[in-house]
Image: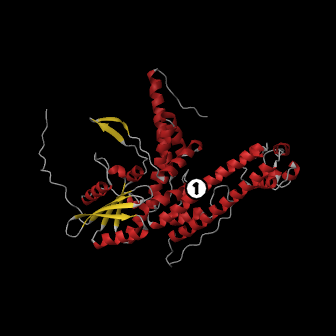
Amino acid sequence: MVKSTNQPTQNPLAILNAHTAGIDVGSMLMMVSYTDPSGQQKLLESTGFSEDLIQLAKTLKSERITDVAMEGTGVYWMAIYEVLEQEGLKVTLTNPRHFKNVAAQKTDVKDCQWLHQLHAHGLLRSSHIAPELYRELKTYVHERNVLQEIKRDTLNRIHKVLTQMNIKVQHVISDIEGVAGMKLLRGIASGITDPETLLSLVNTSKLKATVADLLQSLTGFHKKQYTVVLQNQLEVFDFLKGKMKSYELLIEDVLKKMMPSDENGFLPEIKKKTSYTRKNEYSINLKAYLEGILGVDVTVVDGLKEISVLEIITVTGIDMNKWRTQEHFTSWLNLSPRQKKSGGKLLGHEKRFTNNSATQAFRLAAQTMWQNKGPLGQLYKRLAVRKGSKKAIKAVARKLAVIFYKMVKEKCSYDKTKLEKNIEQQRARKIAMLMREASKYGYDLQPVML
């Protein structure tokens, strides 16, 4: 039986905003399509030089353009985005995957015209771009992470040199980057070859290894070429540590600007970090800054450490009202399942990939739950047994994102009892299932006091 319904006659797409423009962004060429005050569509070509970008923004503003759409192409969009933003134009940065599903010959002119047309009809969805202060913070955090990766590679080269010298101290001491490990490395690089003299540089009572094992591990072949390489690698290591510290000071300056002032207009005083800074930890009191900016201590949540929260807010900011619900937030993070349906049947779930650093931070936090004994750790272990570790990581990452969203938006503290109630419900359902299975075979289960 064929069902018929009365549908209204479809009208052509309405122009929601006539004062729009579309820009096809390139490294050295910008193609612009816009509508002038008389309603005529025009094309404009500009280079990627700073003076030309500023002139382009002024031209669009003189033509009464208010909204500009462009695609996020690599990092080329950043310069023109900031120029347009400074001129007071509303910029819609869209994902190229959302509008390039049309089979046609691809040219720069057609791309900008297609962007212009879709934006005039209100069919483009804007990507989330954090405010300028958060973009500055993200740059500093990213560059510090790059230096951290280079420092890790430098430590690997130091390990290689020690292996070539047949010195095994890196296998005896758990942390070669610690105080004792660095003293021994600097002693070897200075030309000390006697194991007992090297061992006298450190406090052996704080090391788990025995003195005999330490002396054996420090006995090696001290050739000149290896000593020189070790000296140079230590200089590189110190240089990288210094640059990381300089970025931390820049990050602290930005965090101070984000701190809300009190009722008298004064900024709260943040105490300096007194505890020892290990490995890649920040030397500034990052936890106090984050609590002051967010208005709530998010680091009490299992897995969400200070560095992870900092990575997240550099992308999301602290205004959670940009996402109407927690479902919108987790979908933007690509942490919610996206079903594939056809013919009324569920065919599976779409696999989506993202380079969102906030998503990676939530996933890394979820990955640490395998050794956690709290409710989130139990959730991870239960899902890992049933569906595998990959799906468990994604599910727990989504749970962490929901907790983060609610805490930051509602300024509420972390309530672990809500998760514990879910665990009790799971336990009750499991007991009921076991009792039903036992009754099928004529058995009756009774609780035993242990």
Residue 109: name its quadrant: bottom left
Number of numbered tags placed on the structure image: 1
**Which residue is nearer to you in this view: 235 or 422?**
235
Q: How is the image coloured?
A: secondary structure
**Which residue is nearer to you in this view: 59 or 310?**
59
Pinpoint residue 415: horizontal percent, then vertical percent: 50, 53
Pinpoint residue 181: horizontal percent, then vertical percent: 76, 52
Pinpoint residue 174: horizontal percent, then vertical percent: 73, 47
**Residue occupying image coordinates x 65% and y 59%:** 240
**Residue occupying image coordinates x 44% and y 48%:** 354
For label 1, the residue is 146
Residue 349, placed above or below residue 46: above
**Residue occupying image coordinates x 60% and y 64%:** 248
Residue 31: name its quadrant: bottom left
Does 356 sit left or right of 15 as displayed? right
**Which residue is nearer to you in this view: 240 or 352?**
240
For the question of whether residue 225 can be seen, the reply is yes
For the question of whether residue 319 can be seen, the reply is no
Residue lying at the far bottom of the rendered structure: 264
Which quarter of the rendering shows the N terminus?
Answer: top left
Does 189 sit left or right of 71 as displayed? right
Q: Please name the amino acid that badge 1 sits on.
A: Val
Residue 142, placed above or below residue 83: above
Which quarter of the rendering shows the C terminus?
Answer: top right
Residue lying at the far top of the rendered structure: 441
Pinpoint residue 62: horizontal percent, then vertical percent: 29, 73
Secondary structure of the residue carrying tag 1 is helix
**Which residue is nearer to you in this view: 11 or 399?**
11
Does 170 sit left or right of 310 as displayed? right
Label 1: how many Cα within 10 Å (few below 14, some 14–19, many 20+): few
